[in-house]
Amino acid sequence: MHSPNPQISDERTMRHCFALAEKSAGQGEYPYAAVIVRDGTIVAETINRVAHERDVTCHAETVAISLAQQALASTDLSDCTLYANFEPCAFCCYAIRESRIGKVVFALRSPMMGGLSRWNILGDRRLSDTMPEVFAPPPVVLADFLCEEGDTSLRQSAPTVWAFMHARGLMGPPLPAGAECETTGSAGAYVRVIGWTMRALRRNVFDRFGRGGGARPKR
């Protein structure tokens, strides 16, 4: 059986995220969007909701995480991928880590507010090493993905915001060719043995104490 090319899936989903970000700008929001995918299916997608809800916690990523947890009836999103046109901020990255999202893909870096570029929350192993009952190991991160397309999309849909961000240094250049992300996910024996054991414990034991994880409904 032929397996789908994950690069094609990543590209298609990220371009969908760009389109949502353009929609966000057109609705008077900051030009941010987020999409969460599980098993090749979108389970949550949203634009930024801060202006609509008059709530500074309604970043696209946190809203998408909430929608995905409701759709899957679980706080554990470890088999999901989150796509964002901008690098998630520190606030969003903490939510990403606590919801255990397994992979994060973003286009444009945020050197002032990024939860990877400035505060390495996405790659912080102390969270999972100290509290493995709550936090999974760091997610796989695909940074600078389609960043030129993302920059063009932002410039065309929100030229004033684009110019402001560039002038203030709020958008960073991609990593040099060959450079490694600070987090590339888990590897080795931890994933094969300890990682599998802790994931089972988190879902079936620890998550029953106040987190509402438990077993997922069949799809």
Image: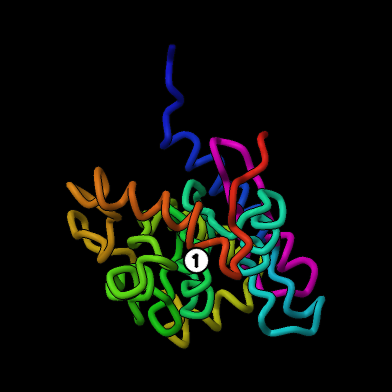
112 sits left or right of 12 in the view: left
Residue 198 vs residue 77: left or right?
left
| Above or below: residue 202 compared with residue 163 | above
Looking at the image, which residue is at 73% across and 78% down? Answer: 50
What kind of residue is marked 1?
Answer: Ile
Q: Quadrant of the C terminus?
A: top right
Rendered residue at 18%/54% (across/down):
178
Query: Horizontal placement of 119 versus 215: left or right?
Result: left
In the displayed structure image, the side of residue 105 where residue 76 appears, left or right? right
Rendering coords of residue 171 (x, y %)? 44, 75
Instruction: Return the residue nearer the eye: 213 or 185.
Output: 213
User: Is residue 35 one of those drawn in magenta?
Assistant: yes
Q: Position of residue 136 (x, y in %)?
A: 38, 61
Q: Nearer the viewer, residue 131 or 1?
A: 131
Name which quarter of the figure residue 47 lies in.
bottom right
Residue at the (63%, 62%) spot, across then down: 212
Q: Is residue 107 magenta?
A: no
- Residue for badge 1: 96
For the image shown, how many numbered marks are present on the structure?
Answer: 1
| Res 105 visible | no
Q: Position of residue 119 (x, y in %)?
A: 35, 81
Give the secondary structure at mark 1: helix
Magenta-tinted stretch: 22-46
Q: Taking 117 as reference, is 216 above or below it?
A: above
